[in-house]
Amino acid sequence: MKKHKIVAKSSIRHRLKRSVSKSEFSVLEAIRSSNLTIFSPRDIERLMGIEKRKCYQLVYRMKQKGLISEIENGKYVVIVPPPEPDILSIASYLVFPAYVSFWTALSFHGYTEQLPMTIFIATTKRKQKMECHGTQIRFVTLSPSRFFGYAEVDGIIMADKEKSLIDSLLLPRYAGGMVEVAKCLSNAWRDVNVKTLVDYVLRMENKSLTKRMGYLIKVLDLPIKTSLIRQLKDNIGKGYSLLDPSGPKEGGYDEEWMLRQNISIKRIREAIY
């Protein structure tokens, strides 16, 4: 996968202070040429062909001079010359594989007017939440079979429109809650490929997710082909699921979609209309 360029393509030689040594300049040029968003001393060792001890000495000096910034233990970004990498670009490369999703992606795609204070990253790995340049970053673990539907967009590895909605519907607590997800689904409906949405739902192989999608399509009166509704209904299984998986086990029952309405339809519609 192509990595985001962190400095301009033109030569950086005349944009740096004279205090930068020849070795430090060579490191910056090597990082630029390799299109690395995030790098480690081992990357410098590999790119420059120099010994490990010298790599760490170079990194230490460059950090002291403000040429690079440590975003977490042993991981750095170039900050001189500007511009510094976008925080979403940094976040999407902190672990591999990973992509920006949930509430952050919904905001990126323009489906919510909210500006989430936390960046949510989907990954197959387990990683503790962290702070980077004053921004909280939270990592949400998905199984490898559910890790799809993303691409690089302007140097950011981002969930596509449909996957950002599906991830959020699966785990709404990472997207502002079920009411917020329902609002985003309504806002996005005419902008997304509905068949792709249904395909993604079925590919996730989660019956509760399938029920939520079908139920929201019904109560929000979203236009959809009958054949796609049938595909969803054929995959809801038996037993009732909660509309809001984080909510209490209460509320009425929707027999068509085998869903317990632990959030009122009125509350959802009020948030949208």
Image: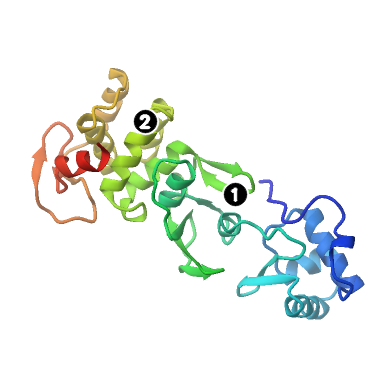
Q: Which numbered circle lies on residue 156?
A: 1
The color scheme shown is: rainbow
What SS does tag 1 mark?
strand
Location of residue 211 by image quarter: top left
Instruction: Sort mark 1 into few (<14), some (14-19) or many (20+) by Cα contacts within 10 Å.
Output: many
What x and y, as percent, mark residue 137? 48, 63
Residue type at mark 1: give it.
Answer: Ile
Q: Is residue 88 above or below residue 255?
A: below
What x and y, as percent, mark residue 108? 49, 45
Residue type at mark 2: give it.
Answer: Trp
Residue at the (18%, 34%) spot, across then down: 257
What SS does tag 2 mark?
loop
Between residue 47 and residue 135, name the one nearer to us. 135
Location of residue 28 by image quarter: bottom right
Identify the residue position indicated by label 2 in the image: 189
Q: Is 205 situated left or right of 68 in this image?
A: left
Between residue 200 and residue 16, name the one nearer to us. 16
Between residue 184 and residue 160, name the one nearer to us. 184
Q: Is residue 245 above or below residue 273?
A: below
